[in-house]
Image (spheres, rainbow, N blue to C red):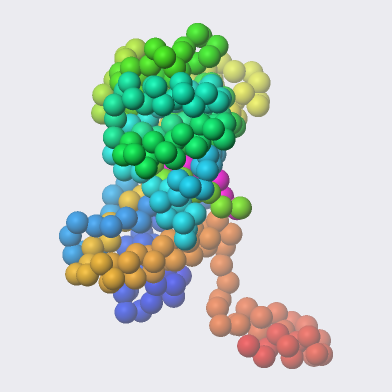
Amino acid sequence: LEKISVVSIGKEDIDVAKTVAKMVWEIGRDANGNFVDNHVDVVEGYKREIETEVIRGMRFPSKLAHRAFLTNPERFEMVAEDVAVFITNYKLDNPYQVVEFLNKVKTPKIAIFAPDFSPMTIKSLIQTTQNGIFCYPVKCPALRTEQLEDLAIYCGARVIDKETGGKLENVTREDLGFAERIVVKDTENKEDAVLLGGRGEKVKRGDGTTIDERVKVLKKQMTESRNEITTISLQKRIANLSSAVGIIRVGATTSAEGLYLKLKIEDGVYACKAALQEGYVQGGGLCLQAIAKKLPKNILTESLQAP
């Protein structure tokens, strides 16, 4: 893995390449040695060096409510830092209700997780963001109520649940959670969100539930379950609540140098993860040459040896 990382990042940064390989190796396998697609976040560092950290995070399928909220259009990515978190299973189709709720909770930055948003609500949220309250609306229609509860426990929030009579007009700041960083990828190949540093890791939620307590409950449900589909679903939820997220902080003397190094490190991360997941072959056309030697000589073998 170190060799693959060096090939991707370059021999002039061997120590950096080894750091990347070590990070991907550490969080990229489960207890049985199987590949786990855990997230590695490459962020700007505070010192003139490369730092690494492994923390607990949550990852789940979702997408941005609108591309207008992308913070990095080149990477089709929205990143929010030190942000309040609001979670509901209501479709937010009343813009006046949503704006009234935002004015009531008075928070400078808020990520809103809901199954869907109406076009008029999106328009109001764009206007609200332009006026100084930064909104990050995220659509997560695939999440069931119990999965939203998992997310709420991680963030230290409370789900505004239509099935139990929760109402937007009754929401207070105590119902909001908090996350140190939220990253939402929204491309054709990938639609998911990663939350880091949820408040639920540090303090109990209003009803006294911590992440570890939630995991214990889910494990008990899994041992009592006789339905294979339910068991698999519980396993995924436990893994999501307990999953690791790798942080690589990139420090440099100038912002241009930092950006260049950050892009190289991201390339190295993708290369190492691909190798863990799918395996690898010798480069430089050597694997094609090995195949050619095992075949009768013809135009195909000549083509394979050309590289």
- Residue 174, how many percent across, how many down? 30, 18
Q: Which region of the structure is painted magenta? A: 189-194
Q: Main secondary structure of the magenta part?
A: strand
Q: Is residue 66 visible?
A: yes
Q: Quadrant of the C terminus?
A: bottom right
Pick whichever, 239 or 181, lies toward us: 181
The image quarter containing residue 49 is: bottom left
**Is residue 59 visible in this depiction of the protein?**
no
- Which of 69/190 is in front? 69
89 to the left or right of 296: left
Residue 156 screen position, x and y as percent:
34, 24
In which quarter of the view is residue 212 placed? Answer: top left
For the N terminus, the quadrant is bottom left
Q: Residue at x 52, y 17 (%)?
A: 221
Indicate the position of residue 88 as horizontal and vertical percent values. 48, 23
Image position of 95 with respect to 54: above or below: above
| Residue in view at x 56 percent, y 67 percent | 280
How many numbered discs sit on the rendered protein? 0
Q: In this view, does 294 lie above or below 128?
A: below
Q: Which residue is drawn at 35% across and 79% down?
A: 11
Comparing 221 with 260, the one in front is 260
Please say whether residue 41 is one of the residues in the magenta stretch: no
x, y percent for residue 39 = 43, 48
Residue at horizontal 47 percent and vertical 12 percent from the top: 166
Whether 287 is drawn above or below 53: the answer is below
Q: Give the vertical position of 294 relative to 146 (above or below).
A: below
